[in-house]
Image: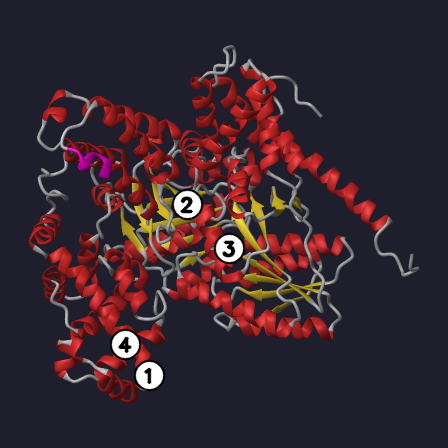
């Protein structure tokens, strides 16, 4: 093996244990979602009975109420029917336990790490209005600093009033430099300057906060396309990441948002924010299944370190805690 | 908006209308589609279930099944029930008889409270009041600054935190005092958002309520909200007190089930809708029109009303007449584009014109920016009067001349002409014998489809 300086090893281990501690803390916050889900299952499912159509219909409703969407809910229940027949399950409670496995399968392993290798790596943070893009950029900057990276923030939301001021507060909290222009400036020019500045100041990641845009606004979406092109022209392989920020309380429209942004900006991953504010987790299943895009990060609060890597297993355990039998660990 | 729900309902109704007579099984099969469509549109599952139950009990009644057009009868039932679910009559924001009227804006993070605060201020001014904004969101970084920028641009006075007013309640109280001093009669208080109602936020909001006489507490809700909408609405209603809802981001393609659920399950009236990013983009919520919109008609009534508010009435009447007659010329088209630009965000206006989107797609980008509009205008101005009246005479040679005269290219000219022809086709189909009756009836506030009575209230 080459004896190159080893950045992994200890640092990677430390990062892994940090991630576990983080999920430990987050799980507490997700209890709300878990409790809501468990309560739904207890109240609405005829648990004492066998597995009949009535049970499966009620289960479909419970899943829809978790924002799974009709298609995913029906898909999961269909999968569960097959699984129950194959395993000879007869009791509703056993079927509910099997549902967790069914969901785990739908969250198949996708690469969820951020790929931020470039000179510098450009990471665009995009999404509709009010999902938490600016906050996510701030938290992500902090996270990267913790990982030993040297990020620089580009304030490319030149549209929303005081967006730059809000981002500056986050940049200061994270201890990261920020490149900004005047309100109304060309976002592409901000990005260009940020990339230049990153090279001059030896920064290895440019985190780009973009203006919120409803995905139905074609002219704004075209502007986003331009940002992508600037990144592609200035940095080889850029933009390395295009993270679409989705609000966990959004319903079926999240799909429509993701589709449109995917077309314009070749989204590489999702950030699900406000996960603790939602008594629902189902939207996540729906989006992953329908778009084949990995949820890479989840946000669960307003503090600097409230953004973590998404761990499907830990997420499902939190969701199913309190359902029927004490949750398996 | 609501496009997908419309598609689903249309598909479901086709089953009904295809047959002369309906069996109970037919009704159930069709209503299952309606239920799924509602669920897909984020209508809360309980609301959807009750909705279907009500329709069913009426649809399988003798008079429907034995009537000559049972399919249409069921569609009418769905429409009426949808109007009912959306809230029946229009509810308006009211002002206190004795000033000041204090309006408190509440909501989750990112719902659009700060933007809506300024929109409400402009609405109050349009209705003859003198508004003042209070920046009492002391949580989110730069929220005060954001409101300051927006309010200042509209020349609305603003009160924010100062060294001796550091709590939202104190800021709100100072806002009311300032309003009295400045002679402002409407005070709009922007509050901090949270992910959910926790104790610190509740205390903050109760303190604001204790400090100032809140006349109306408005819950600001993102139209894209999913099944959580009912929980949010009931939590704020029960723990803080809410008088009505403002639905934001309705210019998205959100199907807007949240609107239905909050009205039906939380009993909160929808007061207004945010339909664009500009401060003027706030509109009254009309349940009956929304229901029609869900059922697939461009909301011509709202368009005409908006035109009346900002363009001279005569111009609006002419526009309405020409639209209905399907007799637009390119001259009209340019005149309208110029007018429309004053009306609101162009996209929200064009969404309401039948075929508006298709026109824009034909005209190049799906939604033109100001530059493209200028190009379109230049092309029309480079045409002869005959070409403007009858664009179909434009051949390759005329295209080249128009392109040269307007600084554009022949393909751009042909895109404009093609898009215009599409829109005319759309208008003509609406303006045809049956369509014209429908549209005229709709404009008078009558029924939507042939054979319909006035929607029941």
**3D distance between C-alphas at marks 2 and 4:** 37 Å
**Mark 3 neighbour class, 10 Å CA radius: few under 14, some 14 to 19, many 20 or more:** many
B389 left or right, relative to A83: left
Which residue is labeled 1 in the image?
B408
Q: Quadrant of residue A89?
A: top right
What residue is shown with label 4?
B414
Q: Nearer the viewer, mark 2 or mark 1?
A: 1
Crowding at label 2, few (<14), some or many (≥20) Cα neighbours within 10 Å?
many
Q: Residue at x 57, y 40 (%)?
A: A275
The kind of secondary structure element at disc 4 is helix
Which of the chains bears the disc numbered 3? Answer: A
* Nearer mark to the viewer, of 4 and 1: 4
Which region of the structure is painted magenta? B14-19
Q: Quadrant of the N terminus of chain A?
A: bottom right
Q: Quadrant of the C terminus of chain A?
A: top right
Mark 2 → mark 3, Cα distance in angstroms: 13 Å
Residue contact between numbered discs 3 and 4, judged by CB atoms under 8 Å:
no
Q: What is the number of the mark on residue B301?
A: none
Chain at tag 2: B
Q: Mark 1 or mark 4, which is nearer the start of the sequence?
A: 1
| Mark 4 crowdedness (10 Å alpha carbons): few <14, some 14-19, many ≥20 | many
The extreme front residue here reads A86
Q: Nearer the viewer, residue B179 or A68?
A: A68
Q: Is residue A84 left or right of residue B305?
A: right
Q: Relative to residue A322, is residue B304 drawn left or right?
A: left
């Amino acid at each position: 093996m080459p004896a190159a300086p080893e950045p992994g090893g200890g640092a990677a281990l430390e990062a892994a244990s940090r991630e576990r501690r983080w999920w430990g803390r987050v799980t507490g916050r997700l209890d709300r979602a878990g409790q809501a889900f468990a309560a739904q299952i207890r109240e609405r499912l005829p648990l004492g009975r066998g597995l009949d159509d009535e049970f499966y219909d009620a289960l479909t409703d419970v899943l829809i109420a978790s924002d799974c969407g009709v298609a995913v809910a029906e898909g999961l229940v269909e999968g569960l029917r097959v699984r129950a027949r194959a395993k000879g399950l007869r009791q509703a409670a056993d079927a509910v336990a099997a549902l967790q496995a069914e969901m785990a399968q739908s969250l198949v392993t996708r690469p969820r790490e951020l790929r931020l290798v470039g000179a510098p790596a450009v990471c665009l943070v995009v999404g509709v209005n009010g999902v938490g893009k600016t906050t996510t950029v701030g938290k992500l900057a902090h996270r990267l600093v913790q990982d030993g990276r040297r990020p620089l923030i580009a304030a490319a939301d030149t549209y929303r009033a005081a967006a730059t001021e809000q981002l500056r507060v986050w940049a200061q909290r994270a201890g990261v430099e920020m490149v900004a222009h005047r309100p109304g400036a060309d976002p592409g020019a901000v990005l260009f300057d940020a990339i230049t500045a990153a090279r001059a100041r030896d920064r290895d990641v440019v985190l780009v906060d973009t203006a919120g845009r409803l995905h139905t606004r074609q002219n704004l979406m075209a502007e986003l396309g331009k940002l992508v092109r600037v990144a592609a022209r200035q940095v080889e392989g850029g933009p390395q990441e295009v993270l679409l920020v989705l609000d966990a309380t959004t319903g079926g429209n999240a799909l429509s948002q993701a589709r449109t942004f995917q077309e314009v900006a070749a989204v590489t991953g999702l950030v699900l924010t406000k996960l603790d504010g939602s008594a629902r987790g189902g939207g996540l299943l729906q989006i992953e299944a329908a778009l084949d895009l990995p949820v890479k990060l989840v946000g669960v609060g307003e503090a600097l370190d409230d953004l973590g890597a998404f761990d499907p297993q830990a997420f499902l355990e939190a969701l199913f805690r309190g359902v029927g039998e004490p949750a398996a660990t | 908006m609501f496009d997908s729900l419309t598609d689903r309902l249309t598909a479901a109704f086709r089953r009904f209308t295809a047959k002369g007579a309906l069996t109970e099984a037919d009704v159930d099969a069709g209503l299952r589609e309606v239920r799924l469509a509602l669920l897909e549109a984020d209508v809360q599952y309980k609301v959807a279930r009750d909705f279907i139950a009500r329709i069913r009990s009426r649809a399988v009644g003798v008079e429907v099944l034995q009537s000559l057009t049972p399919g249409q009868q069921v569609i009418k039932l769905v429409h009426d029930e949808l109007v009912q679910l959306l809230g029946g009559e229009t509810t308006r924001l009211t002002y206190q008889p004795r000033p000041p009227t204090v309006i408190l804006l509440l909501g989750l993070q990112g719902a659009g409270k700060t933007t809506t605060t300024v929109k409400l201020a402009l609405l109050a001014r349009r209705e003859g009041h003198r508004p003042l904004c209070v920046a009492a969101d002391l949580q989110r970084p730069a929220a005060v600054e954001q409101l300051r920028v927006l309010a200042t641009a509209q020349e609305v006075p603003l009160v924010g935190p100062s060294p001796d007013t550091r709590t939202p309640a104190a800021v709100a109280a100072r806002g009311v005092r300032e309003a009295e001093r400045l002679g402002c009669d409407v005070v709009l208080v922007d509050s901090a958002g949270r992910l959910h109602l926790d104790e610190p936020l509740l205390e903050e909001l109760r303190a604001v309520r204790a400090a100032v006489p809140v006349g109306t507490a408005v819950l600001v809700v993102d139209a894209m909200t999913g099944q959580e909408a009912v929980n949010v609405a009931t939590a704020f209603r029960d723990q803080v007190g809410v008088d009505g809802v403002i639905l934001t981001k309705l210019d998205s393609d959100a199907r807007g089930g949240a609107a239905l659920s909050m009205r039906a399950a939380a009993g909160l009236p929808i007061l207004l809708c945010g339909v664009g990013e500009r401060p003027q983009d706030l509109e009254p919520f009309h349940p009956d029109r929304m229901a029609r919109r869900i059922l697939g008609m461009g909301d011509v009534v709202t368009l005409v009303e908006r035109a009346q508010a900002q363009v001279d009435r005569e111009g609006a009447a002419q526009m309405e007449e020409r639209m209905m007659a399907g007799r637009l010329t390119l001259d009209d088209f340019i005149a309208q584009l110029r007018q429309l630009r004053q009306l609101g965000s162009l996209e929200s206006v064009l969404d309401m014109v039948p075929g508006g989107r298709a026109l824009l797609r034909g005209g190049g980008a799906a939604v033109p920016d100001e530059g493209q509009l200028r190009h379109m205008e230049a092309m029309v101005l480079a045409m002869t009067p005959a070409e403007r009246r009858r664009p179909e005479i434009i051949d390759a040679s005329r295209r080249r001349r128009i392109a040269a005269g307007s600084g554009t290219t022949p393909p751009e000219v042909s895109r404009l002409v093609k898009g215009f022809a599409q829109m005319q086709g759309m208008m003509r189909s609406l303006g045809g014998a049956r369509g014209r009756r429908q549209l005229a009836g709709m404009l008078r506030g009558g029924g939507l489809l042939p054979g319909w009575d006035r929607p029941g209230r």
